[in-house]
């Protein structure tokens, strides 16, 4: 994270300038994105790895006991707080992280 680099700066003026740069707004990511599932794989512990028609690949953070998802299903990726994301399919949602 950019802020971690700032904490190592010894010079007060340079450290403040580093924090100012780190606090600058980044390009805003969309809050919600819709796509269609083109492939589904599983990791060894059962977490789903979902490929979307836009080329993005998302993986579940934790394996859910039951998360029905099939190739061709429409899904949404919803941005949450602190950089978190949820994959929504129908009335179900699961925490995901972007792989590609």
Image (spheres, rainbow, N blue to C red):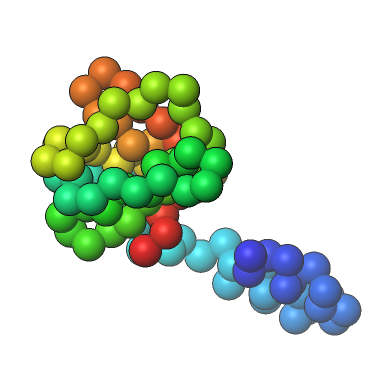
Above or below for 27 versus 93: below
In the current view of this chain or complex, which residue is farthest to the front?
44
Pinpoint residue 8: horizontal percent, then vertical percent.
Answer: 82, 74
Indicate the quadrant containing the N terminus: top left, top right, bottom left or bottom right. Answer: bottom right
In the current view of this chain or complex, which residue is farthest to the left?
72
Q: Residue at coordinates 26% horizontally, 18% vertically from top-left?
A: 91
Q: Nearer the viewer, residue 72 or 11?
A: 72
Q: Nearer the viewer, residue 49 or 32?
A: 49
Above or below for 6 versus 11: above
Does 80 sit left or right of 90 as displayed?
right
Above or below for 77 versus 16: above
Pinpoint residue 30: horizontal percent, then vertical percent.
Answer: 28, 50
Q: Nearer the viewer, residue 9 or 59?
A: 59
Residue 70 showing in the rendered view = yes
Q: Residue at coordinates 75% horizontally, 81% vertically from top-left?
A: 14
Pinpoint residue 86: horizontal percent, then vertical percent.
Answer: 39, 36
In the current view of this chain or complex, which residue is farthest to the right?
10
Pinpoint residue 18: horizontal percent, then vertical percent.
Answer: 67, 74
Q: Nearer the viewer, residue 57 or 34?
A: 57
Residue 96 showing in the rendered view = no
Q: Residue at coordinates 67% horizontally, 75% vertically from top-left?
A: 17
């Amino acid at each position: 994270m950019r802020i971690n680099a700032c904490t190592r700066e010894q010079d007060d003026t340079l450290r403040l300038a580093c924090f100012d740069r780190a606090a600058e707004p980044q390009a805003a990511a969309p809050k919600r994105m819709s796509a269609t599932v083109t492939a589904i794989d599983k990791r060894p512990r059962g977490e789903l790895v979902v490929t979307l028609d836009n080329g993005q690949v998302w993986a579940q953070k934790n394996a859910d006991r039951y998360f029905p998802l099939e190739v061709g299903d429409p899904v949404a990726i919803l941005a949450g707080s602190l950089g978190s994301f949820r994959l929504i399919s129908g009335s179900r949602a699961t925490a995901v992280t972007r792989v590609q």
